[in-house]
Amino acid sequence: MNPLKSLLVSSFVASALFLVQAQTPDDLAQLQQHWAVLKYQQAKPAQEQAFTNLVAQAEQAKTQHSSDARYLIWEGIIRATYAGSVGGLDALSEVKAAKKLFEQALALDPNALDGSAYTSLGSLYYQVPGWPIGFGSDKKAREYLLKGLEVNPAGIDANYFYGDFLLQQKEYKAAIAVLEKALVAPARPGRETADQGRRQEIMQAIASARQKIKKS
């Protein structure tokens, strides 16, 4: 499989993060909900076009709220997820755009959406191929994922992505501990679709880690 096709398949693809603050604006809440439906319920053949439309909506919303880090984060999340659908050079351009958006969001407000820009950026660093294809870096991934956990230690996404990173690093026992914490994270009102889909990914990751331990 093309490495760029699979670079975000694990979850983000996304990858993705949908940490929600109180009093989320209606247009941002709609982007979050549409993202969750497309990622977890939309059939694969139709995902690419659907995400193309959602990217355009996210970019328009960001333009109208360019000083609000939350909109930058969500455009980045949607672009990263879109990258997992298209693959190839288009995927690389999308993840680079997402990276820039997350960096801009951190400059505006590193605590926005419970620090999800940190977690989102960390997710890109461990799922995107390294040089010369992409900008992936396990060292930077760990750094940003841990910063995300500092801001939101009980969050489902912050724990899931760090746990998945540990799984990729073959730190299986540590991965299970973090993933189990993600599994019991507090539910997010209005984010039922996202929570359900994420918990399925968490359980799959835990099963994979346990299987790896048995084989080692």
Image (tube, grey):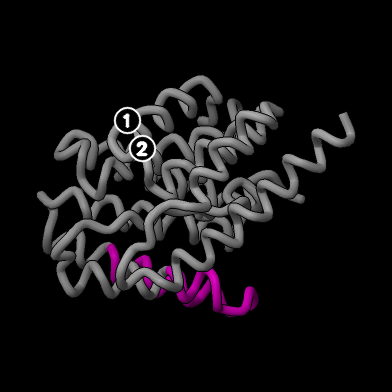
**Residue shown at the point (69%, 31%) measured from the top left:** 172
Q: Is residue 5 visible?
A: yes
Q: Name the foreground residue: 16 vs 60.
A: 16
**Residue shown at the point (44%, 66%) measured from the top left:** 194
Name the residue beneath numbered marker 2: 153
- The image quadrant of residue 192 is bottom left
Q: Badge 2: how crowded within 10 Å, few (<14), some, or many (20+)?
A: some
* For residue 75, above or below residue 69: below
* For residue 111, above or below residue 30: above
Q: Is residue 213 left or right of residue 109?
A: right
Q: How many marks?
A: 2
Q: Examine the structure image and report whether residue 43 is included in the region drawn in magenta.
A: yes
Percent position of residue 202, x then y: 59, 52
Percent position of residue 139, x then y: 51, 20
Which SS does the magenta portion mostly show?
A: helix
Name the residue beneath numbered marker 1: 150
Does the residue at mark 1 contact the one at mark 2 (Cβ under 8 Å)? yes
Distance between the Cα atoms at labels 1 and 2?
A: 6 Å
Q: Name the foreground residue: 78 vs 207.
A: 207
Q: Is residue 5 left or right of residue 51?
A: right
Q: Which mark is residue 45?
A: none
Element on which disc 2 rests: loop
* For residue 106, above or below residue 206: above
Percent position of residue 154, x then y: 37, 43
Which three-letter amino acid code belongs to the residue tagged 2? Answer: Pro
**Residue shown at the point (26%, 45%) measured from the top left:** 114
Q: Badge 1: how crowded within 10 Å, few (<14), some, or many (20+)?
A: some
What are the residue bounds of the magenta stretch?
36-58
- The image quadrant of residue 150 is top left
